[in-house]
């Protein structure tokens, strides 16, 4: 009989970005490249030497915790959102956050490394699918010769369309979004942040983004922003 050896995973860093809740986080990394984040190391790991050579890579792997989905139980099957939330697949055939170990794996673009900040070395990354504050357990360089497989098949997801919504963002509301955040916000909205089972055209949704409360409705394939206001005014 095999025995499991206990091991404590150490949080080495946390990511910081504009999405402070799970709602709106892209369903995969790289879908919204305009989303910019920073990886800030925890005090024991703020060592520039630990990053020596990383600057020569364009992309990195982040191994992280689904901190919003930690639970004591697990199910062998889950309902993938891309299948409408009504079809069950084996948990190990999905990227669902509800797993025996709530671990996520993402490839992000490394835009730069700031070695001398008040928080020690900081990584600037793009295209992350992590909410603000997510714990990171490890960082590894992405190696195209071993990690890239153009011949790979996509299983049951191969026939699913890459569906993007048309975003109607009136100028009066868009003007309240900082210029350097607009492309990222539009990308998040285009990818339809709603749960797959919600299709009520009269429902008003709220997205927390970069200190703003963005309200919108969706009718058919058109998402319409109906209000933008600072979060503190909620």
Image (spheres, grey):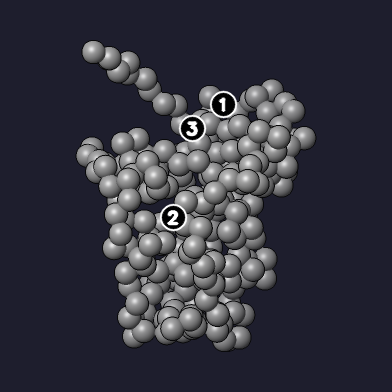
Can you say whether 143 is above or below 37 in the image?
above
Residue 156: give its label: 2
The residue under label 3 is 137
N-terminal-most mark, 1 or 3: 1
Element type at mark 3: strand
Residue 45: give its label: 1
Locate the C terminus by quadrant: bottom left
Crowding at mark 3 (Cα within 10 Å: few <14, some 14-19, many 20+): some
Element type at mark 2: helix
Query: Residue at point 54% right, 44% down?
Result: 106
Marks 2/1 in contact by CB < 8 Å: the verdict is no
- Which one is closest to the eye, mark 2 or mark 3? 2
- Which one is closest to the eye, mark 1 or mark 3? 3
Residue 6, position as x, y percentages in the image? 32, 18
23 or 59: which is nearer to us? Answer: 59
Residue 83, position as x, y percentages in the image? 38, 62
85 or 140: which is nearer to us? Answer: 85
Disc 1 and disc 3: Cα gap in Å? 11 Å
Locate the N terminus by quadrant: top left
N-terminal-most mark, 2 or 1: 1
Q: Is residue 185 visible?
A: no
Q: Is residue 184 visible?
A: yes
Picture quarter containing residue 57? top right
Query: Residue at point 64% right, 52% down?
Result: 126
Picture quarter containing residue 171? bottom right
Can you say whether 145 is above or below 155 in the image?
above
Instruction: Please give left or right for residue 73 compared with residue 139 in the image.
Output: left
């Amino acid at each position: 009989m095999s025995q499991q050896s206990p091991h404590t995973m150490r949080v080495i860093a946390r990511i910081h970005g504009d999405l402070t809740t799970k709602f709106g986080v892209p369903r995969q990394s790289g879908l919204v490249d305009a989303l910019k984040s920073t990886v800030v190391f925890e005090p024991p790991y703020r060592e520039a030497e630990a990053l020596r050579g990383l600057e020569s890579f364009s992309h990195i792997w982040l191994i992280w915790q689904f901190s919003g989905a930690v639970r004591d139980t697990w199910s062998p099957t889950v309902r993938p959102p891309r299948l409408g939330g009504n079809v069950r697949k084996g948990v190990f055939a999905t990227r669902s956050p509800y797993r025996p170990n709530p671990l996520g794996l993402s490839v992000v673009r490394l835009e730069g490394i700031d070695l001398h900040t008040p928080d020690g070395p900081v990584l600037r990354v793009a295209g992350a699918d992590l909410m603000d504050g997510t714990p990171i357990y490890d960082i590894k360089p992405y190696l195209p010769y071993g990690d890239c497989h153009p011949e790979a098949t996509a299983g049951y997801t191969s026939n699913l369309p890459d569906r993007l919504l048309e975003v109607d963002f009136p100028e009066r509301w868009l003007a309240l979004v900082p210029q350097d955040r607009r492309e990222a916000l539009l990308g998040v909205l285009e990818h339809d942040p709603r749960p797959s089972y919600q299709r009520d055209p009269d429902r008003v949704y709220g997205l927390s983004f970069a200190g703003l409360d963005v309200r919108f409705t969706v009718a058919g394939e058109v998402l319409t922003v109906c209000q933008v206001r600072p979060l503190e005014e909620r």
